[in-house]
Amino acid sequence: MISPRPLSPTVEQLDERLVPAVLDLTTRGAEVIADGFIARQVDTQPTGSGAIDSFVRIQGSARGGGSEQGYNTTARPLEFDENKSPRFTRGLTVGEVPQVIVNGVAYREFLLDINQKGSDPYLSVDEVRVFLAGTSNLTGYDAASHTLAGMNAVFDLDANGDVSLLLNYRLNHGSGSGDMTLLIPDSAFAGADPGTFVYLYSKMGEMAGATANSGFEEWAVREAPRVQPPVVQPPVEQPAANNGSLSGFVFVDANRNGLKDASETGIGGVTIQLQSVDDLGNTVTLTTTTGIDGSYAFTGLRAGTYSILETQPENFNDGPDFVGTIGGQTAGSLDNDRLFDILLGPDQQGVNYNFTEQFKE
């Protein structure tokens, strides 16, 4: 049960819903408060496609008007109307979803940016469900049971009755601004560690007069404010502080064990990028290409936390990636074509940070 709160622009209270409800967010600053969520009309950023970092883009095939659906995953092929690029439809972890506090209650915030014709600007958000899992590549959404890979949702927009959120594209500047934030109680994520993967399924455009009629819709999360390191005089560098290295291979992993055997084909000419902030607070970005045997190495590294990114080679199917070892211990985390949170100490060597591929049949 929701207690009244002072109204700002437009607030629709939801206490008990016995019939389908349309929750109106078509006026600037509108807000809907329910037992299971808060939805707000927002204008978060200047216009420009790509200004927000989406984790799933959805665009139905019927541009003249229709419904569309989809969810984020690293699995391919995709199941519904998702953009297939791993940049725009990808894995998302709990740790990436910002936490906000409203009236003393913790929520997780998701941002939706829509694209509609200016002459026909309304779009309905008819279904939203959130799932949690230990891997990023689940697939198999069942519309009848509302499950993903057999799992039940930890959040359902329709948990207390059938509702649709109604949005107005003309309130904002265009693509990349963001149109709505959806705040889901943090209690839905109870027990999930920061590395747990989050899946958000949504269906839009089912309402008459509010069908999907133009470009893609995208769900995103806002980045936490960047804290600039304090300006300090760098300490005197010790000669032994920049003798670290990170290395690995890009290769066709025939036996799929993540280690390059002598008989397995290395892939040369693949672009590998290294990113980090080292122990002096310096931002480091280095790029190299793999040798003919598929090997790469970054040497002369200071202590720091590193990420290694692979540019997917053409003419190969993407295979699993593998976190390597430092001092015999596994160090780092992984996502598609990205190894990250690699903590490298002074003069340490990390090996077997490998990206594997498969021959196209």
Image (cartoon, rainbow, N blue to C red):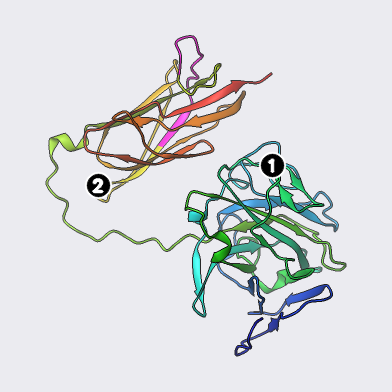
Find residue 106 and report its horizontal and vertical position in percent. Answer: 51, 70
- In what element is the residue under mark 1? loop
Find residue 26 and report its horizontal and vertical position in percent. Answer: 73, 76
Q: Which mark is residue 279?
A: 2
Residue most extreme to the bottom: 6
Residue stretch in magenta = 260-273
Q: Which mark is residue 139?
A: 1
Q: Is residue 293 left or right of residue 144?
A: left
Q: Taking the image as drawn, is residue 121 in sight?
A: no
Which amino acid, by three-letter code, is at mark 2? Asp
**Quadrant assignment, res 149:** top right
Q: Foreground: 231 or 223? A: 223
Q: Which mark is residue 113?
A: none
Q: Is residue 34 left or right of residue 338?
A: right
- Rounded to the nearest angstrom, the CA distance separating label 1 from label 2 is 40 Å
What residue is rendered at 40% in x and 39% in y? 332
Vertical placement of residue 82 versus 96, above or below: above
Q: CB of mark 1 within 8 Å of CB of mark 2?
A: no
What residue is rendered at 43% in x and 33% in y? 323
Which amino acid, by three-letter code, is at mark 1? Thr
Find residue 140 and report its horizontal and vertical position in percent. Answer: 73, 42
What residue is rendered at 53% in x and 51% in y? 93
The main secondary structure of the magenta stretch is: loop
Find residue 113 and report its horizontal and vertical position in percent. Answer: 65, 62
**Quadrant assignment, res 347:** top left
